[in-house]
Amino acid sequence: MNLWLKIQSGDELVLADMPEILSLRWNYFRDNWEFLKRNLTSRAASYRDPGLLRQLIDEFSTFIDEQRHQPINAFSDSAVFYKYYAIFDNIKISSINATNDERAIINEKISRVRAYSKNDFLAIKKNMVSYRDVLADTIGLSDDDYNSAVGRSSVAQKTDASIVDLNLMNSVQGSIVVVDFIIANLFAVDAVVDPFALARSNANNPDINIGQYSSGNLVKMEYGEDLQSLAYRYLGDANKWIDIAIANGLKPPYIDEVGQSIALIANGNENEINISSTDINGNLNISKLYINQIVVLRSNVEPFPDQRTVVGIRQVPVSGEIIIELDGTPNLDKYKLADSASVRVFKPSTTNSSFFILIPSTQPLENPRVEETPWFLTKSSEDIKMAKIDLAIDDSGEISFGTNGDINLSYGLANHIQAIKLKMATELGSLRRHPEFGLINLAGSTNDGVDSIREALIASINQQIELDPRFSRVESINVEYLTGPNNNAAGKILISFSVRLAGSGTVVPISFTVNKQ
């Protein structure tokens, strides 16, 4: 997982990312350890745990001396990798002059990890969750309600929980959160989007004319690259760097790779962090922030930086303290003052190698994406597949959640019915972005216009069904105006109709009443 993140972000790989070639590196370490030791010692202060690295350097020196004259490969034991992990975590792959065999192993692993699918990450998460749960059982921290909700049987406690066990569980849970983030965002970049519309939304000046381009591609620039070289690489003309700047709403200095790290002045709380009114140089921090700005959170104990988007900014009167609201999971309490928590901000209207940048194009936007059928519907009938998948909505109109806290999905016949209910319960024209969705409003209709009301309702219902590819047609429909002094539904209109599903002979009956008042 860590290797996948590095590949995606373009970070330099280290030997710890490639334990497969470690057994081929014994002679290299045996003959060059003194040189490697000096370099490692000089970098120890910048490592996330300097004391641990210095200790392992000393222990590894003793290990090298003991094994140097032995006839066996000291790295053939996989335990060496785990015992001295911090050593290998500080040696860059680019510094070891890999052989052809080693390079083949490295390239194969990079290609395999880069091609990880959503199912691969779901499998990784499943293994992590299983390991976490068994560990919780083993040290007596299992939860009966959780076990019942996910349908698992716990194992008997074998030992009491120690601080080491708790740290391990916290680390595993943190990795699960990272996998969840990857799963949630992995296919968002791959999804069919209109990057030209994205350019419009990101441009700071709405009057900028970018109409000469009809599409574009989202790419990442190389670290240290400028807009001129980016324009030459993708547009064939370095002078077109201004087109890229306009399409992305960039302003001088256009690129900000470093940004500025601002220390938090209080522990994080749910989705909020606090920073002081000025930085160490007395400059106002409020001028460095804006809505939809991408920032990066770090601390000494979090293994991965946390990229978030600013959704709210407010300043406390008198003190000037700034409270920043960020998107994503409300778990910012993990960023604490004791762990040197900070937020890195970048200059407004700039980009860097960590973010996607739009390369404008005059070519029509290609759509290579093929519609995928979820694994749990692969063996279902065609009409079930055509129903697609939506979020499940309960009877009160709220999103439906399962017993384990996950959002329920609506598919198959249930989704057909849910779709019809939503169409019939929505007033036509009430959705600004979908003015054609919903049933006509009967408010103000008179009793002597029952026939015209009936015709209008039938036409409206037919139109809603015809616009939805999940349905074939309305098989039958009856609209009845309810009257009578003893009828509790008097003054209402009873609608009964049946709909044939697309791709099958299934007919779904629907009935409901509509208030005419």
Image (cartoon, rainbow, N blue to C red):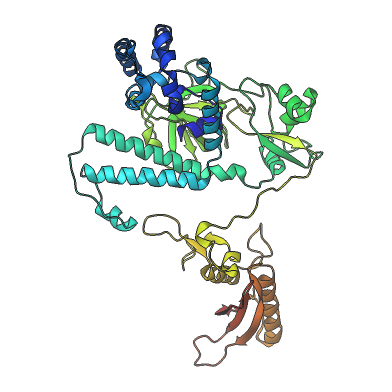
Which of 509 and 266 lies nearest the eye of the viewer? Answer: 509
- Residue 190 x, y percent position in the rendering: 61, 44
- Residue 135 x, y percent position in the rendering: 27, 42
Task: Name the image quarter holding residue 439.
Answer: bottom right
Identify the image quadrant of the C terminus.
bottom right
Count of marks placed on residues: 0
Residue at 57% x, 58% y is 373
- Residue 278 x, y percent position in the rendering: 49, 21
Which of 34 and 282 lies nearest the eye of the viewer? Answer: 34
Residue at 69% x, 45% y is 194
Residue 166 makes an appearance in the image:
yes
Is 227 situated above or below 427? Answer: above
Is 474 situated above or below 340? Answer: below
- Residue 222 x, y percent position in the rendering: 63, 25
Task: Name the image quarter holding residue 66.
Answer: top left
Residue at 58% x, 37% y is 292
For the view shown, which residue lies furthest in the front direction?
A: 71
Residue 270 makes an appearance in the image:
no
Is 372 situated above or below 497? Answer: above
For the view shown, which residue lies furthest in the right direction?
A: 212
Which of 422 and 149 lies nearest the eye of the viewer? Answer: 149
Q: Is residue 339 left or right of residue 414?
A: left
Q: Is residue 67 left or right of residue 284?
A: left
Is 475 situated above or below 178? Answer: below
